Amino acid sequence: MESTSSSSFVILSAFIISFFLLASSPSKALTQEDNFLQCVASHSNQSMPQLYVPKSPSFLSVLQSSIYNLRFTSPATPKPLFIITPNHESQIRAVVVCSKKHGLKITVRSGGHDFEGLSYRANVPFVLIDLVNFRTIDVNIKDNSAWVQAGATLGEVYYRIAEKSPVHGFPAGACHTVGVGGHISGGGFGLMVRKYGMAADHVLDARIINAKGEILDRKTMGEDLFWAIRGGGVTSFGVLLAWKIRLVPVPPTVTVSTMAKTLEQGATELVHKWQSVASYGVPDKLSIALHVGVVDTVNNNNGTRIGSRRTIQATFTTLFLGPAAQLLQVMEKKFPELGMKQEDCKEMRWVESTVRTAGFPDGTLVDILLNRSSLPKTTFKAKSDFVTRSIPKAGLEGIWKRFLKEERPELVIGVWGGRVNRISNIRLHFLT
């Protein structure tokens, strides 16, 4: 994605020559494509951005490069009229101005890990701005902050922070391929949400381009708009260029534990108890996330395999901002039913925990955080909701029954509480 093939440059050059020739021949009508390209060229202070149209040889490979949900790679999925991979802010400004002039919707892709594909598809004619080249991360340990361009991934942010300091981190999601532009603009939560709140709570400044093509920061956009883009979805208000984020302190040693329990090992009772413990009963520096899926277990008879059966498996992923000894004390007091032992706990640096809690096996190097293609691409449908009351055992058993009828269902429940619950009220704030 970071470079364009020579054939693409030839096509782009042909487009540029084409619309200049057409502009000099009033008798020949310009196509929509020519008009848009001519507009972008005239408004770009820098060179013309890399641009792909459906007939470009690299169009599909660029479009699909960061699509993880293969549902949206089918021929039936609406495609953009243009894909732009800009290298400079002025190029984005030109695309915004020209899209507005020609009545084209803009979608913005900062990472591509998008459950519903809203960052790269639409049901009306649209232009896709892919911010893959906007990936600069400037970490300033002295003032506990970093400027992060929108196209950087969470994994890249975690890695670059750790390069500068082992005791600084950032509270955001567990999936390292998510782009920070979209993640933070939607709020952004992860396994440190109980201790530090949402990622959006730690935004100090931002740079956006509004519908007029103006580049604004916190001061020039005003506090109302600055409030709105931190949770309200940035593309409702403009194109996010970069966030200035506040770094948070993390201890030199954190503890991670991953424990899986099947129905036969008491998963239903454990999940039921977990609901009353994870959000309210443990210290803020402890988060226990839950993943439920279906697995095949082997049936044995005196050491001889006689078959397998499908069952429910609940996996409890724990992040504790401190040493294992303290975690074991808390778990023995608050959640002894899980049976956590010393051998279930692994002490590590915070940056290493971001790899482990993302589901990678022991021994995976932190360099994986820089790999945007390290997750498998598959076909799925996902839906999110908030659970405000504990699910009774009968409800859990109903879910398990349904799961066992499906091919590969998954249920992921994150934990809140802690700092999030100490916000006593929300002041309604309207844009004027």
Image: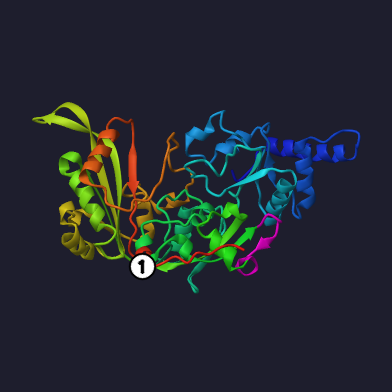
Q: Is 14 included in the stretch rendered in magenta?
A: no
Does 235 sit above or below residue 8?
Answer: below
Tag 1's secondary structure? helix
Question: How far across and down, in percent of the image, does residue 343 sit?
Answer: 19, 54
Residue 228 in which image quadrant: bottom right
For the point 47% across and 42% down, the residue is 115
Does 423 sit above or below residue 93?
Answer: below
Residue 169 in which image quadrant: bottom left
Residue under circle 1?
422
For the point 48% across and 49% down, the residue is 178
Inspect this view and state whether residue 89 appears: yes
Name the residue at the left extreme: 302
Q: Is residue 19 left or right of residue 10?
A: right
Question: How far across and down, in percent of the image, does residue 259 sit?
Answer: 24, 49
Q: Is 220 included in the stretch rendered in magenta?
A: yes
Name the residue at the bottom extreme: 142
Magenta range = 210-221
In this orientation, which residue lies closer to the viewer: 104 or 287? Answer: 104
Question: How far across and down, in percent of the image, does residue 212 sit?
Answer: 71, 56
Does 175 sit above or below residue 243?
Answer: above
| Image quarter hosting the N terminus | top right
Inspect this view and state whether residue 138 appears: no
| Image quarter hosting the C terminus | bottom right
Q: Is residue 127 left or right of residue 349?
A: right
